Image (spheres, rainbow, N blue to C red):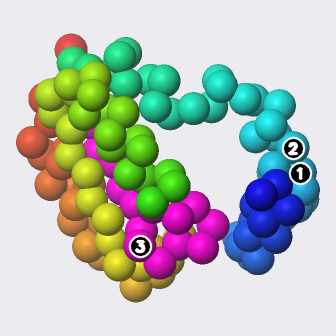
Amino acid sequence: MRRAYVEAFDEELLPLRGTSGEALVAEMETAGAAWKLAGLAPRLADRPVLLVGTSRDAVTPYETHHVPLVEAYEAQRVARLEHHVFPSDHALSDHRLALARTVVDFLGRSPVAA
């Protein structure tokens, strides 16, 4: 499984410089549980949360990354949870305008912190 992550990251490094799939996976392994977004759900239960996934993402498949995160946040009863899965790749190459509209709409419905 580790090798699969390294290879997947290696294929998506175009916008990144000075790193590698191996370096990114090693960084994830070092961070461990501290980088598990599901663990933030209790701290975010009283805040608006927008989660975005993509259904054609070879790097972070939504079934592995997005769905469990949504389930964790729903289990913590994050009251203002909104989530979307766009039929796009990791970079949302063909859905950037839709993503921008989704984010702007979400922010427009979210209260401003004092």
- Tell me if mark 2 has few (under 14), some (14-19) or many (20+) residues whose alpha carbon lies within 10 angstroms of its own: some
Question: Residue placed at 12% from the left, 45% from the top?
Answer: 108
* Distance Cα–Cα, label 2 vs label 3: 26 Å
State the quadrant of the C terminus: top left
Question: Which image quarter: residue 72?
Answer: top left
The x and y percentages for residue 104 are: 21, 55
Identify which amino acid the numbered label 1 is placed on. Answer: Ala
Please state which of residues 62 and 16 is positioned toward the viewer in this rendering.
Answer: 62
Question: Residue placed at 40% from the left, 60% from the top?
Answer: 53
Q: Can residue 51 be seen in this view?
A: yes
Relative to 102, say whether 92 is above or below.
below
* Distance Cα–Cα, label 2 vs label 1: 5 Å
Q: Name the residue carrying label 2.
A: 26
Q: What element carries label 1?
A: helix
Q: Count all numbered tags in the image, as a single digit.
A: 3
The x and y percentages for residue 27 are: 82, 40
- The residue range painted magenta reads 48-62
The x and y percentages for residue 5 are: 76, 61
Whether the residues at callouts 2 and 1 have beta carbons within 8 Å, the answer is yes
User: What label sits on residue 23 in the rendered view?
Assistant: 1
Q: What element carries label 3?
A: loop
* Distance Cα–Cα, label 3 vs label 1: 25 Å
State the quadrant of the N terminus: bottom right
Relative to 112, say whether 84 is above or below.
below
Question: Which image quarter: residue 16?
Answer: bottom right
Q: Name the residue carrying label 3.
A: 55
